[in-house]
Amino acid sequence: MSFLPKPKLHHPKLPTNALGYTRRDYEGSISTLCAGCGHDSISAAIIQACWELSIEPHRVAKLSGIGCSSKTPDYFLGASHGFNSVHGRMPSVLTGANLANRELIYLGVSGDGDSASIGLGQFAHIMRRGVNMTYIVENNGVYGLTKGQFSATSDKGSKAKKGAINTDEAIDLVALALQLGATYVARGFSGDKEQLVGLIKGALRHKGAAFIDCISPCVAFNNHEGSTKSYDYVREHNEAVNRLDVILGRAALTADYAPGTVQEVVQHDGTVLRLRKLASGYDPADRIAAMNYLQERKAAGEIVTGLLYLEPEAEDLHDHLGTVELPLNRLDDAALCPGAKALEAINDALR
Amino acid sequence: MPEPLTAVNDFVVKFANVNGSGSASANGLFAKAILRMGIPIASRNIFPSNIQGLPTWFEVRVSGEGHLGRRGGVDLMVAMNPQTWDRDVAEIEPGGYLFYDSTKPLPRSRFRDDIHVIGVPLTEICNAAYSDPRQRQLFKNIMYIGALSALIGLEPEVVEALLGEQYRGKEKLNASNRAAFHMGRDWALAHLRPIGLQLRRMDAVGRRIYVDGNSAAALGAVYGGATVCAWYPITPSTSLAEAFERWCRRHRTDGETGRKRYAIVQAEDELASIGIVIGAAWNGARAFTCTSGPGISLMQEFLGLAYFAEIPAVVFDVQRAGPSTGMPTRTQQSDVLAAAYASHGDTKHIVLFPEDPHECFEFGAAAMDLADRFQTPVFVLLDLDIGMNDWLCEPFRWDDGRRMDRGKVMTAEMLDAGTTFGRYLDVDGDGIPYRTYPGTHPSKGAFFTRGTSRDRFAKYTEAGPAYVDNMERLLRKFATAKSWVPRPVETRAAEPTRLGVIHYGSTGAAMREALAALQGDGVRLDALRIRAFPFHDDVMDFIARHDRVFVVEQNRDAQLRTLLMVEGNVDPAKLVPVLHYDGTPITARFIRRAIAEKVQGLRIGPLHEVAAE
């Protein structure tokens, strides 16, 4: 337990969003994670993003698997339904939930153990299917709840707290998501909230499979010298290719940016994603170039962050299946049951 | 040489074919034509785990008396597969008949002296009539049906009518099939005489339908309002998902937009299948998966979550012979315990046991209601015999006044009216709490679903009393289910008896036939067909009313008997197992012999004295 419970009352002048909600209305239970945990910063970024986008909290469904990261949905959006499911299987539960009601916003929160080890299969398949969601992996390269074992995203050569050196190759979830057809792929760092909030906002407004790999140092087991997922290491090696501003509705480009440094992308719902380019020539519309760039920088020891790939007019699973507009969970007897007369015709055909 | 078998409307025909040779549709035509003559049949496919080239058999039991179980033994073998010739010939009852393609002469040693051999030069006739190799193969099948029609009295008009229905709008195909049928028939009429096994038109089929259990269960899911189906291909359940898609395409497609009022996902494995089902049901849709034993093993962890977090889920388990990969294309009732107690920790699940496709439909729809009502997994245990074979059964029925029972769902209106919402709060004393669907209300009714322990208001806790409180409520809920699930069906012996027999699922047909035969042998038995777990009080009453109760099952370990002992605290000595588990469907002959032997072994004295007590 890191904090004392916060009082319900808040300052009357706290800013409100278009719905009249303050940021406090997007908070959840008090975090039980360690003080300084990167995951709490991600929760704070989710709260900020939802508040800024004026999302109605109860229209979000939060789903997770098992692990430190998967506990976090309890710590934000207290007015949303949450589902802390089974280790490594959140993607299937989220897929089912999404099929039942296409109108809610689905937020999947997972960890590197949950998504890259036990859940690698389900991670892959939810990306392939293009489920409309925001899928965040809070990636610390270590098993926290079981006290410090390497996870599948630990870099080869990275040192564990007790001194062991990881000899297994790391799984790069961003590379996988790109290869498997995710239509919004980003990497963030829990230590850079400004960049992260933009990435989450863009993902929440994206229709299709949106994936954010968020490096999130584990202060208890993976923040030491020799770890490649420590705050210091990530700060030193972070190569941000862009920063993202999400603008609801079309807004005129102001003159604040140097020419050629801003790229605008309009998503299907009209949201404008304004990318402030940091790496010259990086084009997030080119999936293959993105994959190449990532491999190249990785070989150079850099961690590429930012919005890495975006397909603004993506299709989702419902488009592929051709389901009706009305959510399946709202269809009534008349819409679902063919009735006695149809059954008599079926009987006749079986005689 | 024994006398040739003679029988009217009471014999077994078996077709020995090669998988993938197109014989299935010809054999199906044969079966349906007999039904159209008003004569009941029981038909079964016997096939290997293979795509093409291996042996496959189709067995038709013609039974004017209406016995629908497998009889055992073969009276007329249609031997179209040289690979299995020897064992097919060996299977024929003495005095029985062997029908074969006599194009290539076979030595005397390949036949038997005690059977009657009927040779028809099918290949020769075919090769003379057709030049295309595929046509030669396909029409050979229809041609032997033609020859058989002359031999056993299958009415050609009925076959023609069926062909007309099958090829409606495809006149060319209809005509060529008819021609092939008559080619075979004419040859037989010219060269052969009718055999001792004869079909005679009767009126014993009535309004019954002929359908497989998987299609019926899938249709039940459609009528029950299922909208999400997630599945992974596995024999013998695959055709259930495929049937659901077929029914939905016809009955759940929006007429104007062509959009679907259903979603089917072929998942990456069974874990994902049940995960998708649980996610969809958590979010208020009716969802199911279909699988077989190996899939049930894979789903264990998720099933425990659904039990503990109280999320509806319907699982159709079309059982096959286990353990492990077992015999994928053979039948068994060996997942009873795996379903009833699925997952680690203390769990119990609702399990339904349909006996035929009619009940597959009924229970398929009922399972959707039960899952919502009890917010828990519901298993429908079919088996390969019911699932993949066409059965003659009562027609499907539906009352248009029936509505989905969505169970206890708290709405925004109820929340606004100030109703207390505790996700795991037992408001009505029946153990069933209220739930809310995600997105119901801006500020009320949200909760965090978890597989960890929680209090009545869904707050995480590891406090012992809160945990026990919840586990006890789950037991209360399960007890409530007893009177909601399908009741057992009792059949009393003609006279009072202290002996009883319990059976379930696809055993029903063979059991009924065995009961009649045993009655003739002087063995009187009251019979109880169990249709669901948890057991209705009638089940324990039945056991209490009898000194000995045989429990007939299609597995090695007497799984239902174990469940009865454990759940009803029944003395094991009282429940006598009768077990058939070689992968073939149980027969009346087997049950009759096994029970007769056991009755003798029990030394319970002359049966009339028992009955007189």
Image (spheres, grey):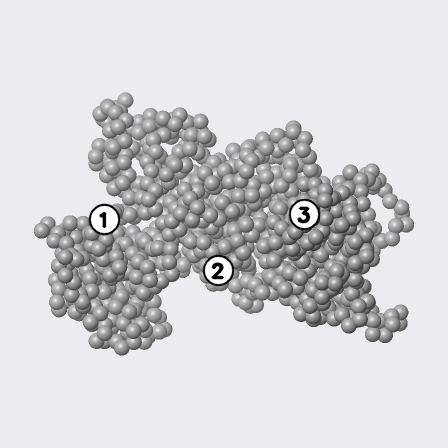
Number of the label disc, if any, that sits on residue B73: 1
Question: Mark 2 highlights which residue?
Answer: B245
Q: Secondary structure at mark 1?
A: loop
Label 1 or label 2, whichever comes before in sequence order: 1
Number of the label disc, if any, that sits on residue B440: none
Query: In the rendering, at what x and y percent does residue B574 appear?
Result: 36, 27
Residue type, numbered disc 3: Phe
Q: Are marks 1 and 2 on the same chain?
A: yes
Q: Quadrant of residue B83?
A: bottom left
Spatial CA span between label 2 and label 3: 44 Å
B125 or A344: nearer the viewer: B125
Q: Label 1: chain?
A: B
Query: In the rendering, at what x and y percent does residue A176 appear?
Result: 64, 60
Q: Are marks 1 and 3 on the same chain?
A: no
Label 1 packing within 10 angstroms: few (<14), some (14-19), many (20+): some
A229 or B432: nearer the viewer: A229
Q: Is residue B410 visible?
A: no
Residue located at (51% from left, 47% from top): B298
Question: Mark 3 highlights which residue?
Answer: A150
Residue located at (21% from left, 68% from top): B122
Residue type, numbered disc 2: Glu
Query: In the rendering, at what x and y percent does residue B541 appear?
Result: 40, 29
Q: Is residue A328 visible?
A: yes
Spatial CA span between label 1 and label 3: 62 Å
Q: Is residue A57 above or below residue B309?
A: below
Label 3 packing within 10 angstroms: few (<14), some (14-19), many (20+): many
Q: Secondary structure at mark 2?
A: helix
Residue type, numbered disc 1: Gly
Label 2 packing within 10 angstroms: few (<14), some (14-19), many (20+): many
